[in-house]
Image (cartoon, helix red, strand yellow):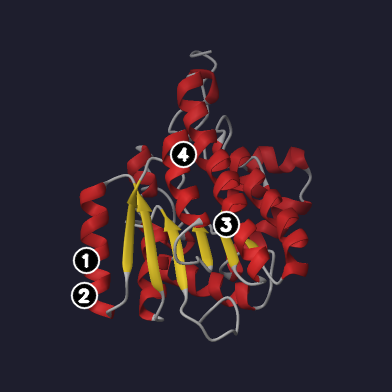
Amino acid sequence: MTPDSTPHEQRALVTGATAGIGAAFARRLAADGWHLVLVARNAARLAETAGELAERHGHEVETISADLSTDDGCALVEERLSSGSPVDLLVNNAGISLNKPFLRSSAGDETRLLRLNVHAVMRLTLAALRPMTERRRGAVINVSSVAGFGAVMPGSTYSASKAWVTNFSESVGQSARPFGVRVMALCPGYTRTEFHDRAGINMSKTPGWMWLRADDVVDDALRDLRKGKLVSVPAWRYKLAVAGLRHAPRRLLHAVARDTRGRIGRDEA
């Protein structure tokens, strides 16, 4: 499955490619015959992932060890997007959440979240779109979240960063479409990955029916990309949730918000 119908050697660049949704994209694209450029911070894990995919599928797998919350890390990936073998699909998957309320956060932590979730997405999308629009083919998938449709995490800035990603992708997608290039925001709900564990977020009370499989999220994303959608929300239950978030009165939304990882008690204020 490819983002366009032109028969040529396809190459995808995936950030945050060693775990979760990023790893699922890498597995699926490699199985579909894509050459890969994988980006992650952990060089050893990155090399292991690349070796496994190259051995299993026999396709070229490049690696870039980079911290995309830094200017130097973004510059490394920007350089690869603008030179070398053309990249036909960019998957901006790398992102973080903070297990703390804004009132107990620090400027350093909040800046890192914005640099990774927002700034890196903007920079890499821009770097990818320039050659894609010149070639009149290509696609960008920016991994956002259902959380971006409403303030469902009281005190958390994660949902605000994902609201930007969704709005940005939808807007840029409209301007790129006349050039034969697609940009889509992928907005999954809770997905079984290492994401919450890495942030130290206890999700043990989240009902099982709310969880999605990363492989299913990728299947839905690639299907919606082929359809030309600007925003993809996997799974019917989260499509319903997004409808509620978009249309429910804000007072009601605030009253029923259940993800309390960012709350702060009055005795702590």
Q: How crowded is the residue under tag 3: few (<14 C-alpha within 10 Å), some, or many (20+)?
A: many
Residue type at tag 1? Gly
- Ranked by sequence position, the earlier of labels 2 and 4 is 2
Residue ID for mark 1: 51
In the displayed structure, 157 sits above or below 51; it is: above
| Image location of residue 154, percent across then percent down | 58, 33
Residue type at tag 3? Ala
| C-alpha separation, residue under disc 3 versus residue under disc 4 | 25 Å
| Image location of residue 26, percent across then percent down | 38, 67
- Residue at 66 percent across and 78 percent down: it is 227
- In the foreground, 234 or 254: 234
| Image location of residue 81, percent across then percent down | 50, 56
Residue ID for mark 3: 128
| C-alpha separation, residue under disc 1 versus residue under disc 4 | 29 Å
Residue type at tag 4? Ser
- Residue at 73 percent across and 68 percent down: it is 179
Q: Are marks 1 and 2 in contact (CB under 8 Å)?
A: yes
| C-alpha separation, residue under disc 3 versus residue under disc 1 | 25 Å
- Residue at 36 percent across and 75 percent down: it is 30
Residue ID for mark 4: 97
- Ranked by sequence position, the earlier of labels 3 and 1 is 1
SS under mark 2: helix
For residue 55, the mark is: 2
- In the foreground, 239 or 70: 70
- Ranked by sequence position, the earlier of labels 1 and 4 is 1
Which is in the foreground here, disc 3 or disc 2?
A: 3
SS under mark 1: helix
Q: Are marks 3 and 1 in contact (CB under 8 Å)?
A: no
SS under mark 3: helix
> Which of the 4 quarters of the picture holds residue 182?
bottom right
